[in-house]
Amino acid sequence: MTTDALLEINDLDLRYGSSHVLHGVSLDLGRKPLGILGRNGMGKTSLCRAIMGLHSSSAGTIRFAGDDITTWTPEKRAQAGIGYVPQGRRVFRSLTVEEHLNIMSRNRGAWTVDRVYETFPRLKERRRNLGDRLSGGEQQMLAIGRALLLNPKLVVLDEPTEGLAPAIVSDVIELIKLISGDGIAVLLVEQNMHAALAAMQDVAIMVGGEVVVTCTAETLKSDPVLQKRHLGLEPGNVD
């Protein structure tokens, strides 16, 4: 592990009852965005939930900004500067867009409700709408904006392009680049390799709860054998 890493994961194991879902996962993340790729059921979401403290690891350590956070509560991890955009968005049906954002707003740092509205004009238009009256793309914008209002040091995004139309996927990719350019570290978990390669500089591939490959996005993009072996993609599937 590099000593200047913001997030350091060492030999992380995670079990759900008798199921062993993470096997000695080790990763480090500095300020360059990192994509975690893998097919369904490979442990990607479990890794996100372990980072956020939503599942307790059975072995290994997680360090963030120099602190051992392995036993910290999810609330304490968020307060330390880890923002989370969960798979499925988790937008409250009975709250308006504005209520979602005001709950998270701390009125400090670069990201404010006004800046979220500037970044997502559609949310400003829909600010009086309840969560269940938003499209999938609008819900994803809200979930990301909500996380940014913590003014985090790191944002963990779990499958942010899932179920979105191609045009909205492109918008999400550009937003991820904006976040990274704003000095916020990004950990992007994706099954959509096209999206991950467009947004990330470095990637890791998970298979069966293990990290089996770490490489640059360009290396993976140019290696169809690697794509087929670990992601099940046939040559020619990546532009």
Image (cartoon, rainbow, N blue to C red):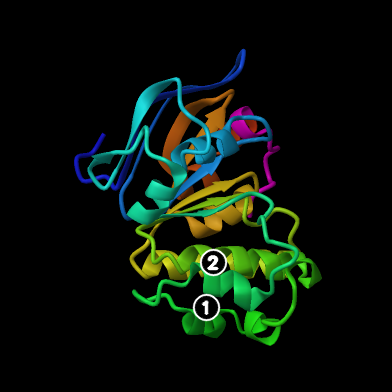
Q: Residue at x 46, y 38 (%)?
A: 53
Quadrant of the image containing the N terminus: top left
User: For residue 109, which quarter of the picture?
Assistant: bottom left
> Which residue position holds label 1?
116
Q: Is residue 203 magenta?
A: no
Look at the image and tell me whether residue 32 can be seen: no
x and y percentages locating residue 156 in the rendered image: 48, 51
Q: What's the residue type where badge 2 is placed?
A: Arg
Quadrant of the image containing the C terminus: bottom right
Relative to residue 73, is residue 239 depicted above or below? below
Q: Residue at x 37, y 70 (%)?
A: 182
Q: Residue at x 56, y 64 (%)?
A: 144
- Residue 49 lies left or right of residue 89; in this view the side is left
x and y percentages locating residue 83 in the rendered image: 46, 56
User: For residue 69, which quarter of the picture?
Assistant: top left
Relative to residue 190, is residue 171 depicted above or below? below
- Pointer 2 local density, CA inside 10 Å: few below 14, some 14–19, many at least 20: many
Relative to residue 128, is residue 232 depicted above or below? above
Give, as a single range, the part of the protein colored magenta: 229-239
Is tag 1's residue or tag 2's residue first in the polypeptide sequence?
1
> Which residue position holds label 2?
146
Q: CA distance from mark 1 to mark 2?
A: 8 Å
